[in-house]
Amino acid sequence: MTNTESIRPVSRRRFITCAGGATLSLPWLESFANTGKGKETIAAQRLAFFYLPNGITRRGFFPGEGDRALPKFAGQNNVWRFAGKSVPPGSHPITLTPTLAPLHKMRKKVSLITGMDRTFQHGTDSHAQCASCFLTSVAPYEVKNSAYPLTRTLDHIAADSIGQSTPYSTLELSCNDHKNNIESIYFDNMSWYGTGHVAPSMRNPRKVYDRLFGTQAHARLRNITDLALGNARQLQKRLGSEDRQKFGEYLESIRTIETRMDRIDQMKSELAAAKVKRPAEHLPRNEYIHLMGDLLVMALQNGLTNVGTLMLGPERWTTPTNWEGILDKPFSHHAMTHAIGNHMEHLLKLDRFHVSAFARLLERMDQIEEARGTTLLDNTIFTLGAGMGDGTTHQYNDLPLVIAGGGGGTLKLGSHIHCKRGTPLANLWLTQLHALGIKREKYADSTGTISEIQA
């Protein structure tokens, strides 16, 4: 424990001001925690979502389905109902299937939620309502004169309460930088201000970085760590020893992101110069997803936002994508789900990679210390999920969901919660609002909360 009594108090605002010609938000530091006798910093509550497009391959993700027969394509608007295994409703020990195995280190801070359903509102393609209505706050057919049961989404509703003290009330990120917009905005966005009013996602890591750290005005001296450190060293020595180390690690993590972005920029320039014939999407998929995830965590860590969404790709788009290090050539994720008999192993590899990318963020967040001996993960509700229970059958029931974090002590995790048939997904969203201290009797078509994860 750092002896803060021997350290002359310095506010975060003054520290940032002395950083000079760059805007640098800071992580939680103990030297800033106690501003007066009897006063102690309380960590902010965060909410984040990690969205998987095109559903998942059930036999790799769901416990007890490893020998499940491969389904046949069910048709775009024929939303199929999967009866599910005979798992009794309630709380069970968590079983980490091959797809979920990357979560092993974090198994005590995650819960697998199965059995939750959505209702498909007939009138659109089934993929069109997957991401777009995943977080919606209205029940099916409730919005008149609209083909979508869609209005203000959970991230913005939560941000109305927990996102008003941060520079950005919400942060919307997407790992889709395709240029061929072959589908409407409903296939490619999960965050909405209201009916018909999309909260557009940011897709370029460089632009996300510039927005978060305000470096566009410093194009010639782009690295924010160099700009900030120029005048911050005089105050850095006034931090406690543990905080000096933490501050150094924080700056190094930013510098690492900068280096990776430079490497991606160079790669894209070399591809363009060589005129190599490749699909429209150039970025190595694993690097792209990891980088956008790191930017989300950085924004949550340093107080730029308390609410964020990360959509790993669009629904239904047929554009082949490069999966360097995962698959041996470009594939269309969506197309593979419609021919699962030929691509099951490919799909299982992608699903496992997506879960491993999520696990990587959880592990990193659990190493970021915050007030009162907690971590960033302890103070976050982070949900991995998809709007379809299976990409081949287009089913809207028994969705794949993993809840991580602790909600500041409001959630109890480490188990597999199987909900009784017909439990609306909205029950989970209502539970999360309550965990954040947001009192609301109903959310969309909710029928209650999930008591098994409520502390």
Image (cartoon, grey):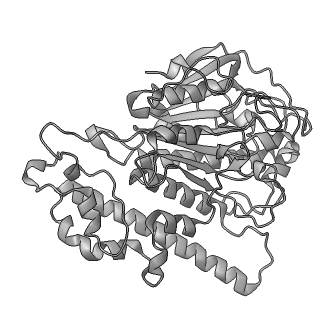
Left or right position of 347 against 256: right
Residue in the foreground of this view, choosing between 206 and 37: 37
Residue 14 image-quadrant placement: bottom left
Residue 268 image-quadrant placement: bottom right
* 177 vs 67: above or below: below
Q: Number of marks in the image?
A: 0
Left or right position of 224 against 391: left
* 18 vs 384: above or below: below
In the image, farthest residue toward the front: 145
Q: Quadrant of the N terminus?
A: top left
* 223 vs 41: above or below: below
| Residue occupying image coordinates x 71% and y 70% | 282
Residue 70 image-quadrant placement: top right
Task: Say if residue 79 shows up in the picture.
Answer: yes
Q: Position of residue 384 (x, y in %)?
A: 60, 40
| Residue occupying image coordinates x 42% and y 65% | 254
* 391 vs 449: above or below: below
Q: Quadrant of the C terminus?
A: top left
In the image, farthest residue toward the left: 6
Q: Position of residue 21 (x, y in %)?
A: 34, 76
Residue in the foreground of this view, choosing between 197 and 31: 197
Task: Say if residue 95 shows up in the picture.
Answer: no
Left or right position of 363 against 193: left
Q: Position of residue 62 (x, y in %)?
A: 68, 30
Q: Position of residue 394 (x, y in %)?
A: 83, 36
